[in-house]
Amino acid sequence: MIEFLVSLSRDKVLVPGANSWLDDVARARWTAGIAAYYFDGPWCPGVALKATPGFADKLGVGPILTPEAGAEVATYHVPQPGDYWLSSTSKNAALANKLLSEHFTTEEYSRRVADTMSQPPRDISVVDQSQAHPAYKKLIGWFKESVFLAPEPIAGNKDLQQVQIATKPVTPTLGDIVQGALTGDVTDVRAALTKLSSDSAAMRDAAIAAAKAKGAQVSLDDYAFPNWKPRTDYTKPMYAER
């Protein structure tokens, strides 16, 4: 993908300066007509049409690009963590729990989320019933076919919280490498990615060691999921089966 982006820049297909624009600037210029295609997430219609309602007639969506025409697309995402949390010191825990469990899990709430065209709602089956733009509905339809639940290590071992706490950022990040490739500062992308992978693994090892020193029961095995198969959801019972 990085090589593809670099080729677009080399072929002068990218709008000059686009690789340094913030999202709101890039999106505004896209809706103004200076570019035909804009790489963004599912929230794009909700943001773009709120600022430029007249763009609705021109808005479309394209699938994830693949090296070969017709290739199957599969993407993976861990279960969405909570957006709202019930504090252990809450004086109205019962009422708060009722609100969280009975309101935020309803079809109506998911439909209202879809109306805003932000991140896909918890229940994506209601998107077709929403007032979302057809492009948003089309994209979520693709998600139904190509997005699968990935395993979340911390769901299998809560002690991994201590590993997360001990983990420090590794730089340059993937975003830094992409930016550097586009500007020419990173000339060997594969070497940069290999180093990032190696440095990330070393940081994880160090964080595991730090967590174990504080009594956490963790190991590299907590990150292994041999019963995970491509193009399938990793469900709750599978954590106990691995």
Image (tube, grey):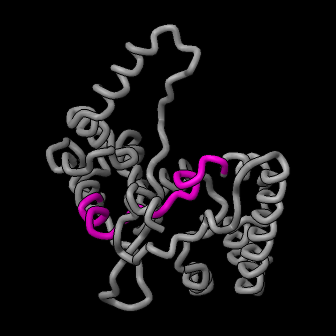
Query: Which of the pair 193/2 is nearer the observer?
Result: 193
**Drawn side of residue 57 relative to residue 183, left or right:** left
Q: Quadrant of the N terminus?
A: bottom right
> What is the span of residues highlighted in magenta in the rendered image?
140-159
Q: Which residue is at 70% across, 50% downward?
A: 164
Q: Which residue is at 50% across, 28% downward?
A: 85
Specify whether residue 10 is in view.
Answer: yes
Q: Which residue is at 70% across, 57% downward?
A: 218
Specify whether residue 34 is in view.
Answer: no
**Drawn side of residue 93 relative to residue 222, left or right:** left
Question: Was residue 144 drawn as part of the magenta stretch in this picture?
Answer: yes
The spot of residue 67 in percent (x, y) is 44, 88
> In which quadrant of the rendered view does residue 107 lie?
top left
Query: Which of the pair 46/242 is nearer the observer?
Result: 242
Note whether 7 is above or below 87 in the view shown.
Answer: below
Residue farthest to the left, as pictured: 129
Residue farthest to the top, as pictured: 91
Note whether 23 is above or below 172 in the view shown.
Answer: above
**Drawn side of residue 194 relative to residue 44, left or right:** right
